Image (cartoon, grey):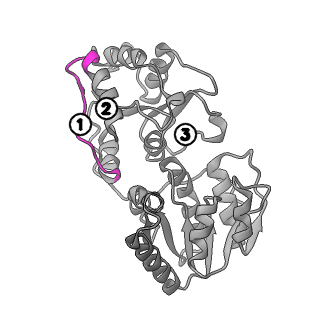
Amino acid sequence: MKILIVKTTSMGDVVHALPAISDIKKHDPQAEIHWLVEAFFSGIPLSCPLVDKVISCRVRQWRKNIFSQGTWQEISALKKQLVLEQYDKVIDLQGLIKSAVLARLAKAPICGYDKHSIKEPLASNFYTHRFSVSTSLPAITRCRNLTALSLGYPIPKDEPQFVFKSYEKEMERKVLFFANTSRDSKLWPEAKWIELGRKLTDQGIEILLPWGSNVEQERVCRIAEQIGSEATVPPRKSIQEMIALIGKSYAVVGLDTGMTHLSSAMGIPTVGIFRDYPIELVPLAGNGPKIGLGGVNCCPEVSDVYVALEKVTHVNSESDL
């Protein structure tokens, strides 16, 4: 069977869809799996060896230049490519009108959520087959359940499996701080990042603060300057470069953002700080040690984050950390 997965954005959502790929291969090892994803996030499915082909789109860019001839040429080329693949099934794990429209380009049977299970009910009208999946389930479980229903195998009950291509594991004494996120309501106060950073650097731990935009760079530079010389702001990196950096890190402390969910999925010791979203709907997942703190209208204390970091790294305040 030849299957197209449609999950275009955002980073955390793309990460959460990965276990569905492992499920497909478990039940049909010969299945050929393609993934349609926004170009900026293509590094995630590209890092999964179970995905046979990654096809990129640029919906965000197309929206900005909807009347451009170049935009329509790209859309036409994408449609031609998808039709030529001759998919047996398309599974829209996104559940948005934009993803449903993209799924229709393939001219193949489309599976998706029914109107009661989907974020944008109009999108369900585009599907050939519609399935009921509770909206109260975690994001990973929703993706896994929809995929199982779409392909006719039992709803998985085991732990989600994330499969990444091998990377060199160096276990450097570096902790990554993912202090940026898409919404200000998710941010943790800079003073708390600084306090936590100083506690770690006083014990010989180096802090790295990645960033992805000018505003984010300004924020992490302010934090790094106050922490001291053991805090570094690296150059901006692609997602694939970030995957390599995460793979070498000692641990990660991050907000409810795609990079934090990615590090947890990769099995890196991870502490997640949640400020405005229920942890139970987007819990940290993966085979490594991880702790999520906070939730809606919460602001975890530095001491709580520090203790959680001790736990996930299996050390205590009297030893290495």
Give the mark toward the camera: 1 or 3. Answer: 1
Lower position in the chain sequence, tag 3 or tag 2: 2
Q: Residue furthest left?
A: 229
Magenta region: 225-239
Give the residue at mark 2: 209
Compared to residue 189, the image places residue 215 above or below, namely below
Q: Position of residue 249 (x, y in %)?
A: 32, 37
Give the residue at mark 1: 234
C-beta proximity under 8 Å, tags 1 and 2: yes
Q: Residue at x 70, y 71 (%)?
A: 126
Could you tell me the amino acid type at mark 2?
Answer: Leu
Categorize mark 1 by other alpha carbons within 10 Å: few (<14), some (14-19), many (20+).
few
Q: Residue at x 54, y 28 (%)?
A: 185
Q: Whole-Å distance between the Cαs marked 1 and 3? A: 25 Å
Lower position in the chain sequence, tag 1 or tag 2: 2
Could you tell me the amino acid type at mark 1?
Answer: Pro
Majority SS type along the magenta span: loop
> What label sits on residue 284 in the rendered view?
3
